[in-house]
């Protein structure tokens, strides 16, 4: 006959076995799951959503970066970019003639597009607001004209906010109209222009203006890197591009097409892409945050 002492010993043993089994199964489950690195005993960030080093904060989605261009060869866009021109065709672009939308008529050859005489400016079919934009351009090798008449074009964001394209190598014009200028508003911080015929790059980060009804609640801001050099650092636009007038804002949509200006000169463009900037803590589409 079992006495109470033996019974309690059996009970203790069984519970020990059960605990061991439980511990093992928890261990097995832990081993199957990748360990989350981070801390939850840390202060909350000021937004009240995440701890400092929070292990549950969504990991940024993974993209593949592009390759850099050389004078001989255009680079490639990052994997999440919208490619606006890869040297092959102008299917993403259009023009306007007498208020009518028509196909873009710039010539495409040898991996670039070139503004043809009397073709007009070209604009993207797609619209963009806040963006990262990469554009490469080259002023005509054959130097013709002077000042604003030499190698003039423009990257006109939202069809309103122009970063000037001009052959500003050994070509004097007013400061707020030279290459890289926020046209009519701010000159570039430095003149980083390359010689005519050479490829040059603009890497742009643009924040679109915000309107509430007719009221401007936040102006547009731009950062521009010209051939690897900062020429505008989060600078405020005073309004839409204007010639011989003060710039001013007129309310417009949150997203609008990008325009390349036709100014009568055979400027070449290649390797144009744009990325919507996005917001923090967005997990990859269709994937649960880890
Ligand atoms: Mg221009």
Image: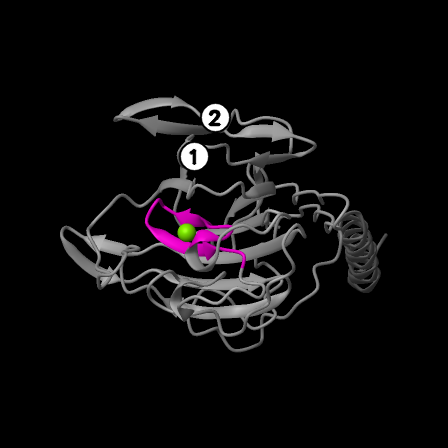
Q: Is residue 165 magenta?
A: yes
x%, y% of residue 191? 55, 70
**Residue that badge 1 annotates:** 122
Visible residue check, residue 186: yes
**Circle on res. 105:** 2
Q: Residues within 10 Å of mark 2 (few under 14, many from 20)?
A: many
> In the rendered view, would you say 184 is above or below 65?
below
x%, y% of residue 73? 76, 43
Farthest residue toward the left? Answer: 214
x%, y% of residue 165? 49, 54
Horizontal side of residue 148 vs 285, given as left or right = left
x%, y% of residue 248? 21, 59
> In the rendered view, would you say 192 is above or below 141?
below
For the point 13% across and 52% down, which residue is it? 214
For the point 54% across and 50% down, which residue is it? 144
Mark 1 or mark 2: name the one nearer the start of the chain. 2
For this rendering, which residue is in front, 189 or 75? 189
Per the rendered image, the range of residues in magenta is: 149-167
- Callout count: 2
- What secondary structure is found at the residue carrying circle 1? strand
User: Within the image, what quadrant is residue 12 found in?
Assistant: bottom right
């Amino acid at each position: 006959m079992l006495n109470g002492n033996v019974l309690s010993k059996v009970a203790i043993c069984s519970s020990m076995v059960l605990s061991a089994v439980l511990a093992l199964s928890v261990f097995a489950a832990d081993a199957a799951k990748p360990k989350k690195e981070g801390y939850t005993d840390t202060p909350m960030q000021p937004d009240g959503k995440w701890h400092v080093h929070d292990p549950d904060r969504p990991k940024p989605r993974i993209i593949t970066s592009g390759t850099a261009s050389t004078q001989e060869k255009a680079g490639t866009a990052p994997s999440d970019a919208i490619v606006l021109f890869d040297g092959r065709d102008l299917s993403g672009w259009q023009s306007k003639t007498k208020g009518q939308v028509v196909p873009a008529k710039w010539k495409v050859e040898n991996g670039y597009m070139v503004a043809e005489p009397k073709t007009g400016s070209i604009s993207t079919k797609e619209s963009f607001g806040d963006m990262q934009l990469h554009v490469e351009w080259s002023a005509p090798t054959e130097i013709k004209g002077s000042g604003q008449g030499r190698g003039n074009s423009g990257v006109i964001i939202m069809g309103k906010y122009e970063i000037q394209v001009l052959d500003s190598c050994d070509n004097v014009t007013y400061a707020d109209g030279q290459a890289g200028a926020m046209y009519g508003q701010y000159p570039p911080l430095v003149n980083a222009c390359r010689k005519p015929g050479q490829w040059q790059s603009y890497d742009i980060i643009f924040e679109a203006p915000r309107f509430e009804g007719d009221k401007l609640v936040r102006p547009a801001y731009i950062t521009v890197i010209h051939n690897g050099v900062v020429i505008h650092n989060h600078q405020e636009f005073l309004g839409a591009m204007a010639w011989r007038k003060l710039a001013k804002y007129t309310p417009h949509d949150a997203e609008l097409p990008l325009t390349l200006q036709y100014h009568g000169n055979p400027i070449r463009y290649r390797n144009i892409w744009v990325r919507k900037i996005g917001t923090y803590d967005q997990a990859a589409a269709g994937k649960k945050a880890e």
